[in-house]
Image: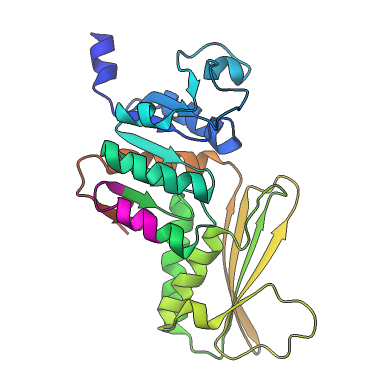
Amino acid sequence: MAEQAAADKPGIVVTGASGRMGQMLIRTVMESPDARLAGLIEREGHPWVGRDAGVAMGGAPIGVTVTDDPLSAFATAQAIIDFTAPAATVEFAALAAQARAVHVIGTTGLSDEDLRKISAAARHAVIVRAGNMSLGVNLLVQLTRKVAAALDADFDIEVIEAHHGRKVDAPSGTALMLGQAAAEGRGVNLAEVADRGRDGITGERKRGHIGFSSIRGGDIVGEHDVMFAAPGERIILRHVATDRAVFARGALKAALWGQDRAPGEYDMLDVLGL
């Protein structure tokens, strides 16, 4: 009876199992009463491949072996949670679409070409993609859009983000989400007004531009400020994450929300009803 009940829960595959987010997702799925851990993926040649994930994580066996064969793992899953790298995510999107499994994407640094391929996969399966899966950040996105709409271009907008020293992309996916929200609030195209990576003699700031500043160091999980600065006053919206569990819980929520939805591209605002 217990085995039948477990089989009725959506099966979740976690990619990038050995990473910090991967291990957090493993724990989150295993602790959930609403899902079961159906598979774990690592790249070919990784030392975790062929091992029980619990043992690989330094604990007791959990009965799930890490594999480098996503096709077979996805075939029996209802959802894939993917915080990896752009090239891997694009490959996983095509395979998840073949399996008609929900694909939750937390990968950042995706190019326009990557996004086009992901959109093509979304014609056949549910894809939930967000630069950040936390409730607080998605509320911050909404607030940023509203504040930007309420203030004119006399207020300079700067998105300031801080992450751990091992993060490989900048600005962060969350910072870009916030910048996009600010641009939408202003009714402008972010690509035309973004200032990124200032260095040297840059000249005066252009009126109406949206700036990005990135900080990297230590074990910072994620900090994001959106500053609206005008002569004589500043408004600062801020979110601080102190535990990656907030992202894992949001990703699992998205995987469960996507069950029985129509194929298409969704984000966390859809999942959270915002």
Residue 156 inside the magenta-drawn segment:
no
Residue 12 vertical position relative to residue 272 in the rendered view, above or below: above
Quadrant for residue 63, please give it: top left
Q: What stretch is highlighted in magenta?
A: 116-126
Residue 123 inside the magenta-drawn segment:
yes
Q: Is residue 151 visible?
A: yes
- Name the colouring of the figure: rainbow
The quarter of the rendered structure image containing the N terminus is: top left
Q: Which of 263 and 182 is in front in this view?
A: 263
Q: Can residue 267 be seen in this view?
A: no
User: Where is residue 262 shown, x and y percent of the image?
Assistant: 19, 49
Q: Which of 231 and 66 is in front in this view?
A: 66
User: Where is residue 75 shown, x and y percent of the image?
Assistant: 31, 29
Taking 249 as reference, is 99 left or right?
left
Who's the residue at 74% across and 85% down the image?
202
Quadrant for residue 95, please give it: top left
User: Where is residue 176 shown, x and y percent of the image?
Assistant: 52, 65
Please, which residue is most extreme toward the top here?
1
The quarter of the rendered structure image containing the C terminus is: bottom left
Who's the residue at 66% across and 50% down the image?
167
